[in-house]
Image (tube, rainbow, N blue to C red):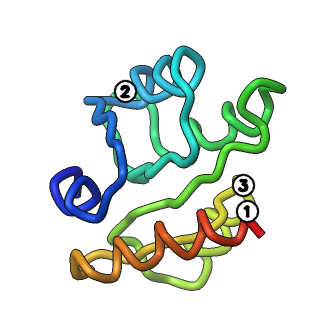
């Protein structure tokens, strides 16, 4: 994912787990977070909830990525505060298109 997004012109900071994602969002200028629901240490849902609860990151764009495709799973992702929800497997072009679309919504 990082390779594809870099090829599409985005700057990417990749992290290993949920706690590192929270640190990266607090310590860096971040426009968007891609969170896998099954990240080690802290789920993407929990990271998203923490990001939304903190004033510093409350408006950070979040795209949830997961293999969980049931309607209830999607609802939980959006209820946690995700701006978009991508179901695995997905193509690199879909990822790039969705990231661009979410970022463009904010720039308008």
Residue 66 position in % (x across, y down): 38, 65
- Residue of label 2: 41
- Mark 3 vs 2: CB contact within 8 A: no
Query: Which residue is identified by label 3?
Result: 81
Cα gap from disc 1 to disc 3, whole angstroms: 15 Å
**Residue 85 in the image: above or below residue 21:** below
Q: Is residue 4 above or below residue 47?
A: below
Residue 11 vertical position relative to residue 76 in the rendered view, above or below: above
Q: Position of residue 92 (x, y in %)?
A: 22, 75
> Looking at the image, which is closer to me, 104 or 44?
104
Q: CA distance from mark 3 to mark 2?
A: 20 Å
Location of residue 25 by image quarter: top right
| Cα gap from disc 2 to disc 1, whole angstroms | 30 Å
Location of residue 7 by image quarter: bottom left
Point out residue 78 in the picture as x, y percentages from the top left corner. 69, 66
Residue at the image point whose x is 28% and y is 36% from the top: 14
Q: Establish if 49 lies above or below 80.
A: above
Query: In the picture, residue 77 is in which quadrant?
Result: bottom right
Q: Residue at x 47, y 75 (%)?
A: 98
Name the residue carrying label 1: 106
Question: Secondary structure under badge 2?
Answer: loop
Question: Is 102 placed left or right of 92 in the picture?
Answer: right
* Residue 10, numbered label: none
Element assignment for label 3: loop
| Label 1 vs label 3, nearer the camera | 1
Q: Position of residue 65 (x, y in %)?
A: 41, 63
**Observer-nearest residue: 105 or 62?**
105
Number of other residues with Cα within 10 Å of mark 1, as a class: few under 14, some 14 to 19, many 20 or more: few
């Amino acid at each position: 994912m990082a390779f594809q997004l870099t090829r599409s012109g985005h700057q990417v900071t990749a992290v290993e787990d949920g706690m590192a994602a929270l640190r990266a969002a607090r310590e860096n200028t971040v426009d968007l977070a891609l969170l896998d629901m099954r990240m080690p240490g802290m789920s993407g849902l929990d990271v998203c909830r923490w990001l939304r609860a903190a004033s510093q990151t409350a408006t950070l764009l979040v795209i949830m990525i997961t293999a969980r495709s049931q309607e209830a799973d999607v609802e939980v992702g959006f209820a946690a505060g995700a701006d978009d929800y991508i179901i695995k497997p997905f193509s690199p072009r879909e990822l790039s298109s969705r990231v661009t679309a979410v970022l463009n919504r904010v720039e308008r």
